[in-house]
Image: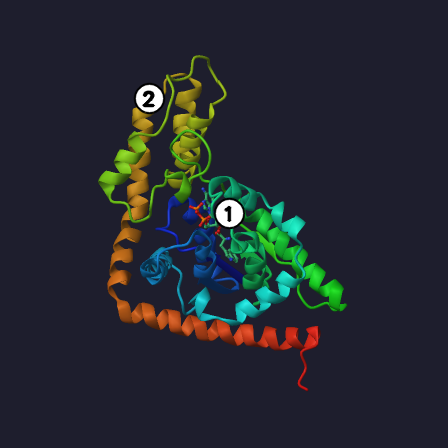
């Protein structure tokens, strides 16, 4: 059966972008593939979180993964830092990764712009650690959002390069995967760009009804269409994208017709959107609270997940050491 791996950095609560871009695919894939999901806490060190937040953030994401419907019986969940084998593979990949190519990665260049005082080597080698996460389990498919495409290309590059250097057919090239025909990019409600934690424009799965309503009602709109069948400007297109994701195609068509006939009232559309987002989040919200309160179960899930991940990682590392030339003396 094909293998699937994916992870998310624990840097805050999961938002609708994370859900529709990644976690929804995790939940669907667990029935069809040999899946493992993890919490990328080492990756989160690139932005220097406080020690007291590290475990807490990992717990938060674990409760949220479970609340979204990942079933650890079908798909083990582990915390990246519980599987130290990944670091060894990271080291090997770093030996074959070149400064120039790492510096050209868009997300690295963005970080250089955003945090010029903290351009650390971990940021530069983010793609090699990610490649180690994936190739450690010889994954075939990796469910991630569109913004991870370049990191996926790097993972394929490191796999190919390893095979070429050692003249083996060892690592397969992993492909990114999404259930929809195209990768989803969930927009923010502030008129442009994507929903993202650092953008400060997120609706979180744990937001309560009043918060959701406030956020949606404040979404950027314009004065309305001035011509029949007018093309939508970005802020309006964004609202429609969210509507299609959360409310479904019928609601989309309904408001789309009103827009095309110049009869749309954005207030109505927003009210429906807020209602539907709340209906979607409410059951997840309740489960997040329930799992968060069950310390024992969470620990058990993380422990069992780490055991499974270590088994798979040990096997890969044994083989990789052999290929590289670390044989017993
Ligand atoms: P953030 O941008 O909020 O920091 P992450 O970068 O931690 O989120 O993303 C975790 C996962 O969620 C990745 O697979 C990413 O592709 C996906 N993701 C994040 N935001 C979006 C979005 N707005 N649309 C689609 N997928 C997203
Ligand atoms: N880079 C991913 C993100 O920001 C997180 C991640 C780390 C990941 N390692 C991974 C995703 C391996 C998939 C596979 O969301």
Q: Residue furthest top?
A: 226
Q: Kindly identify the residue that appears in the image at 60 percent across and 74 percent down.
A: 317
Mark 1 or 2: the one toward you: 1
Q: Is residue 75 in view from this perspective? A: no
The correct choice, above or below, for 34 with respect to 194 in the image is below
- Residue under pointer 2: 265
- Residues 55 and 319: in front is 55
Q: Earlier in the sequence, mark 1 or mark 2?
A: 1
Horizontal arrangement in the rendering, residue 273 relative to residue 125 (left or right)? left
Residue 26 in the image: state x and y as whole percent: 46, 56
Q: Quadrant of the N terminus?
A: bottom right
Density class for disc 1 (Cα within 10 Å; few <14, some 14-19, many ≥20) is many
Residue 21 in the image: state x and y as whole percent: 47, 47
- Cβ of mark 1 under 8 Å from ligand 1: the answer is yes
Horizontal arrangement in the rendering, residue 280 relative to residue 123 (left or right)? left
Residue 80 in the image: state x and y as whole percent: 46, 65
Q: Is residue 155 in view from this perspective? A: yes
Residue 198, by quadrant, is top left
Q: Kindly identify the residue that appears in the image at 38 percent across and 69 percent down.
A: 302
Q: Regarding mark 2 in the picture, which secondary structure is present there?
A: loop
- Residue under pointer 1: 145
Q: Kindly identify the residue that appears in the image at 57 percent across and 70 percent down.
A: 88
- Residues 307 and 126: in front is 126
Residue 326, by quadrant, is bottom right
């Amino acid at each position: 059966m094909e293998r699937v791996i994916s992870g998310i950095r624990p840097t805050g609560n999961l938002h609708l972008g994370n859900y529709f871009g990644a976690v929804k695919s995790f939940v669907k894939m667990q029935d069809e593939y040999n899946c493992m999901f993890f919490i990328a806490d080492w990756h989160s060190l690139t932005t220097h979180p406080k020690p007291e937040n590290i475990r807490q953030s990992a717990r938060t994401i674990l409760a949220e993964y479970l609340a979204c419907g990942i079933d650890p019986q079908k798909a083990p969940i582990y915390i990246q830092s519980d599987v130290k084998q990944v670091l060894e593979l990271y080291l090997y990949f770093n030996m074959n990764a070149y400064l120039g190519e790492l510096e050209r990665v868009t997300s690295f260049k963005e970080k250089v712009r955003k945090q010029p005082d903290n351009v650390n080597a971990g940021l530069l080698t983010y793609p090699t650690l990610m490649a180690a996460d994936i190739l450690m389990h010889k994954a075939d498919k990796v469910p991630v959002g569109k913004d991870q495409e370049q990191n996926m290309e790097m993972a394929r590059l490191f796999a190919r390069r390893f095979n070429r250097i050692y003249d083996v057919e060892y690592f397969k090239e992993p492909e990114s995967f999404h259930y929809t025909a195209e990768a989803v990019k969930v927009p923010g409600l502030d008129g442009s760009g994507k929903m993202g934690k650092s953008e400060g424009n997120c609706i979180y799965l744990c937001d309560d009804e009043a918060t959701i309503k406030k956020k949606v009602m404040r979404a950027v709109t314009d004065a309305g269409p001035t011509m029949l069948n007018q093309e939508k400007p970005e802020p309006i297109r964004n609202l429609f994208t969210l509507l299609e994701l959360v409310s479904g195609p019928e609601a989309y068509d309904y408001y789309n017709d009103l827009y095309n006939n110049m009869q749309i009232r954005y207030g109505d559309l927003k009210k429906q959107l807020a209602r539907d987002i709340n209906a979607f989040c409410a059951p997840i919200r309740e489960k997040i609270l329930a799992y968060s309160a069950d310390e024992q179960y969470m620990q058990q899930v993380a422990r069992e997940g780490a055991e499974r991940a270590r088994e798979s990682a040990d096997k890969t590392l044994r083989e990789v050491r052999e290929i590289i030339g670390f044989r017993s003396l």
